[in-house]
Amino acid sequence: MEAAKIDNTLPVKAGLSPLAIIGSLFFIFGFVTWLSSVLIPYLQIACELNNFQSYLVAFAFYISYFVMAIPSAWVLKITGYKRGMSCGLIGVAAGSIIFIPAAFHREYSIFLLGLFVQGAGLAVLQTASNPYVTILGDVESAAKRMSIMGICNGVAGIIAPAILGAVILSDADALTASIEHMDEVTRTAALNHLAQKVMLPYFIITVILVLLAIVIDRSGLPEIDAPEEEITASPDQVTKTSVFHFPYLMLGVFTLFVYVGVEVIAGNTIISYGTYLGIKMSAAKFFTSFTLIGMLVGYLLGILLIPRYISQQNALKYAALLGVAFALGAIFSTGLVSVLFVALLGFANAVMFPAIWPLSISGLGRFTKIGASLMVMAISGGAVLPLIYGWLSDKYNAQQAYWLVVPCYLIIGWFAVQGYRIGRGKGDTLVA
């Protein structure tokens, strides 16, 4: 398949390349997304929640991808990619500002509404930016470009929970130790004070998002919404009449669903898991950053190795095997060693999204847009699997709940070995 190309010689008013502009958006993805790893233990304390209830944070955020994926394609058809990105940023800003009344009233349902609106805005951004990166060059090196974007995402993911954790969880250990001995009035006042700590950070985030939306809208970013017939596949794909006639895409959607689920579990559960093992919140609040550091190392290796030394599908296969090994290590070890194995899941996860995406949407021809929307819809795996993890944690314990990720990694490995080939036209076979 000959991938569509962007004319990067087009003038960019802000003096930035298209890749740099999209990289800033991936930084936003990471920053906003990984804040939830701190919000889960924070809201569990502030709103007095059990494990299952606390993981509704991930559910509210990621289920919006399922709801908004197809409407996002409709939005982009009207606005084009560049203006659609600005609209998405405004949507994320709207969700962020909702945190202010949520914190003021310490109302969990309003927090969840804000998270849903944030996710809806990010769904529009993801629908526009992921295909943009994929078609910047040939499909065999798409995972490499996605890994570059992953670095932007990962750096933000390291910074975001560390900053927010330092602000809103600074005295969490003392509060949780004393709250049981407080009378009702004192406990309510203490929890209200904790809840309101999030107001200033999210106001600042809102302002930054609005400013970035304006910058993107005026940036001169070249529009890539080429006529769909120009994004062609092999001759036997032209006769397809429905996106559902591409089995490898459907398998890719399911694989991405389980992948995002295990990625969110690795990042969003590690703080609570550390406290379950008896580690103080003052230390555990930084554990998500360790997971993201592992992902960052994986992204860098992906850039260096793919596709020069290893194909994206082989990288995906070996990463899935590592995921199984690290998950078993977390289950059968104890203390900080077990936490380290959970953090190492970030390393195993790094290459997966960059590989699954191009393996799934290449060769779709005129169905590329709707295929990308289905892939974005699959991000809702981050809503479902962490919720199941929370239920398993309440029913058994936080460590045994990690058994959930083992079959998920096996599914990802099967897709890398066989699934991505099923139903693919001869002229569209990727280099193994």
Image: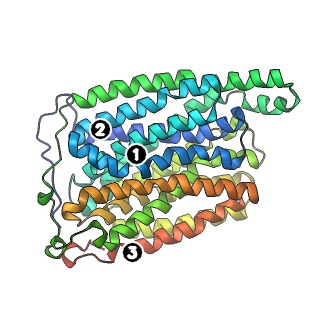
User: Gap in Å between the C-alphas at discs 1 and 2?
Assistant: 20 Å
- Above or below, 165 relative to 50: above
Residue 229 position within the rendered picture, expressed as x and y whole percent measured from the top left: 12, 60
Estimate how packed mark 2 is, as few (under 14), some (14 to 19) or many (20 or more) residues with alpha carbons within 10 Å. Answer: many
The residue under the point 39% across, 70% down is 251
Please identify, in this view, whether the residue under mark 1 or under mark 2 is nearer the observer: 2
Other-residue count near label 3 (Cα within 10 Å), few / some / many at <14 / 14–19 / ≥20: many
- Secondary structure of residue under mark 3: helix
* In this view, the mark in front (3 or 1): 3
Q: Where is the N terminus found, in terms of image quarters?
A: bottom left
Residues at discs 1 and 2 in contact (Cβ within 8 Å): no
Using the rendered view, name the quadrant where residue 188 is placed: top right
Q: Amino acid at mark 2?
A: Met
Judging from the image, the colouring scheme is rainbow
Instruction: Report the quarter where the C terminus lies.
Output: bottom left
For mark 1, what is the residue? 151
Query: Which residue carries the number 3 mark?
Result: 419
Distance CA(mark 3)–CA(mark 2): 32 Å
For the point 17% across and 28% down, the residue is: 13
| Residue hosting label 2 | 85
**Residue type, mark 1 in image:** Ile
**Left or right: 279 in relation to 365:** right
Q: How far across and down, in percent of the image, does residue 373 sit?
A: 33, 54
